[in-house]
Image (tube, coloured by chain):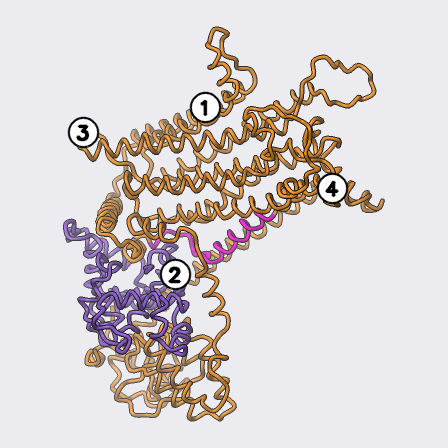
Chain colours: A purple, B orange
Amino acid sequence: MGGSQSVFTEEELDDYQELTYFTKKEILHVYKRFRELDPEKVSEVNKNVQLNNETILELSELKVNPFKDQITKVFSSDGSGNMTFEDFLDMMSVFSDNAPKNVKVEYAFRIYDFDGDDMLSSRDLKEVVDRLTGEGQKLGDEEMQQLIDNIFEEADLDDDESLSFAEFEHVISKAPDFVNSFRIRL
Amino acid sequence: MDSDREGLPLVQSGPSSSQYSGLRNRSNYTQPEPEIDYPDNHQEPKLLSPDELLYRMNYAFINHGFDAEQQVEHAQSNLPAAEQDDYEEKILDKIKENSLPLREKLKVIRVFQRGSNRHHAVKGQYSRQGKTRNNIASAFQLWDGVIKNIAAYFGSNVASYFKFLRILFYINISTAFVMFAFTTLPHLIDTDTESNLTITGTFGELSDSLMFYGAYSNKTIHHYNHPLAYLLTWLAVSVTTLVAIGVSMNVRYRRSKLAITEDNYEFSHRTFCSWDHGITTRAGTRDHIRAFTMELKEKIREDQSHERKAWTVILARLLGRLASNMFVIGMLGGSGYLIYYVAQEFELPKESPDFLQKLFTKYQLTTVVAALKLIVPVIFKLIGKLEAWHPRIEQKVTLTRTTLFYFASLAIFISSLYNVTQECLDNSEGRPDDGSGNINKTNTEFCCWENEVGEEVFKLILVDLGICVAVALFFYVLKALLVKTGQCFDWVKLSEFDVSSNVLDLVYGQGLVWLGLYFSPVIAIVGAIKLIVVFYLRYFVARVAITPPTRVFRASRSGNFYLFLLLLTWFLCILPQAYVIIELTPSWDCGPFLDKKHVDEVITNGVGDLPDWLDNTLSYIGTAAVAVPVIVLLILIGLYYKTRASSYSDLARQLRNQLIFERKVGKREVFAIATSAPAGSLGRTTGVAAANKIDEMEERLPHYQ
């Protein structure tokens, strides 16, 4: 860790510390993990290089996550999944313990929004549930429809068959477990 | 992404540019919709206040045309210099909690930094609190890596058990440290305290040592009043623990944001919040997915089946549950009586071998308590399964019963210890002459009842630990070996990690430590060591022999419930000692209080006599004339707060219904008007004129459903 201290200037570290939910030590740790993904490409000179989506997905914490592709897509600057170190830091910061609930809720919404239209339609919900149930045990059509109907009944306040961000936030803020489960530790 | 914008209905976010401002003003439905800056809107961005800017940054992800950097630059260039600093400070203060992506935030910061080349360092303006909060939180946390490992396989529910264990460990270590520093250490330093008493007890040399109450001196050496220190340290530690638990319960409760406890969001919460991102192993993910799917399907099926069950079935169930509840109460009573009987009167028949006799008399009480603790919860669990409750209710019911049992067994244990003390005092040889002249001095023995009590508690802790280790090794590991080598095929499955019963175990163990603290200051260290052993044992067993729990979704706020149990245990275990201090006579042969009639005399002697008026007041306060009204008053206050709370939740429900209504009705109106009004036809009309215009148009609308 002593070696990578020279990678960032004091000012940069200060900025990062003030804008993310990490301390300087943790930021350097995140950088270390980032560099381990592709040590050749990421060097002291070139620290903000963009790594391929495939490379990022090799991270052990993301590898088995059913939503991994959405996660990288949401946090990358161009929506393609290729991330620079700042994007990566942002991602780990939002998933860290200290991130406030409203930030997590917003990113959860973006992750679940598969088609990117800022609303969670029934197609989005179907995709979420499919990912959660895994390959072998998908829900039958009838069951899926019933589940989606129930979700809309609970959360969709204006009857437009899709959840806007305000409705999503309204529901999720009541969940006691959300902050605990929306967490990745490096 | 930008091309999608045009096709979307206006209803997604309120109309923004000045043409539609009339409509916006008319709308008295306050919706949290940000104004849209359309990319082709060539007007100069309006000058936004800091709060407005922060608000928009929060919703930037929906508002695709919004450019924070541009807004800030514009603001900075248009504000007078004096206000610029203020603006900057306000933004920087709140920017951390904002959900803008990091790269955008960096751009905003750079704008400020460029601007503030004029004077003071930007660093000084960063919010101070964030810095200190971060640094403290990332201070060294014991066992972090291990817990992360567990979370990777088992999820955060199981990890919370280990975190609870860690909290208890911290409590024990700090207690041990304080007790050691103020009572044991002075003893070790001062050689004058060597007493020439030899105390015999079950542990031989250990009984004589500073481990137990008996060896502590009752003198004041070098101005250090040992007995007073003993008492005060114990008191201070107990009260601090109480305060710490109370405060952390309060903090947690506030954080969990007194949400409406109606369970209306079951499906939404299951879908959106149950994936645990902390699970990072393939095996863990697979298990979690399987458990989740099962639970989800079950929930859906349950929702579907609305058949009424035949009344015979209902009746049978009711009777069955009644019977099992009576059985449970019977068991509780029976085990209480058993403990009491063994403590008092039980003796092995004379023919049994000597060593068994010796062993048994030493350990009889402990064995019975520990054995019951092993057997009864298992029986309760079985009963719970047989009763055919809904699974979540079953868990709560079993939890309640087991808790009751633990408390009952602790209470009976304490009262049987009381009998020990009475016996001992009666036979004590150091008993002072009480003036009647007919003390029978022939049958006396050396009596140090505090030591005996301390030893009993210590024995119980050790036996508890022993059983825990034995069960873990012989039951779980053997079972796992059998399952893995395929010996028993399908009958035997790996057990699940039962978080609630393990947590209850921990709470029980902690209760024992608190119980023994007065009688044996070193017991907190023993407690801490026990926790270390239990931690690694459970970790080992979990990795090797146990599957993650199949109930993935826990709807209850169990974290606070366990703290509450801890609090109750504190009361159950510390209050008897308060009674001891006030009512019972300390033994005359040993310990720091051997020459006092009541332990609290130490304080009164130490502090000096209270002035008369204070003395009278205090004794008056203790009487019933004051106590009863105070209790009634407290009950009334409690009821008042409860009524207030329920009226607030009623209010919240009403507001929610109103919100639903307005969203539904309001949105339809806006949508209908927006789709039917030709662009710009509403113009700059505001207020009544606009309202009239809209009413006109509404009448012409087709019915929108």
- Mark 1, Cα crowd under 10 Å, few <14 / some 14-19 / many 20+, is few
The amino acid marked with disc number 1 is Gly
Which percent across, then down, holds residue B72? Answer: 39, 86
The quarter of the rendered structure image containing the N terminus of chain B is bottom left
Q: Are marks 2 and 3 in contact (CB under 8 Å)?
A: no
Seen at 19% across and 51% down, the residue is A143
Residues behind callouts 1 and 2 on a single chain? no
Q: Which residues are magenta?
A: B240-265
Identify the disc placed on residue B330.
Answer: 1
Assess whether residue B248 is covered by the magenta stretch. Answer: yes
Question: Is B343 displayed left or right of A44 in the figure?
Answer: right
Q: Which residue is mark 3?
A: B487
Q: Which residue is mark 4?
A: B221
Residue at the far front in the pictured view? B191
Q: Name the subunit of mark 4.
A: B
Question: Is B586 displayed left or right of A91 in the figure?
Answer: right
Between disc 2 and disc 4, the foreground one is: 4
The residues bearing labels 1 and 2 have C-alpha atoms spaced at a distance of 47 Å
Q: Is residue B694 above or below residue A73?
A: below
Between disc 3 and disc 4, the foreground one is: 4
The amino acid marked with disc number 4 is Ile
Between disc 1 and disc 2, the foreground one is: 2
Q: Is residue B19 above or below residue A50?
A: below
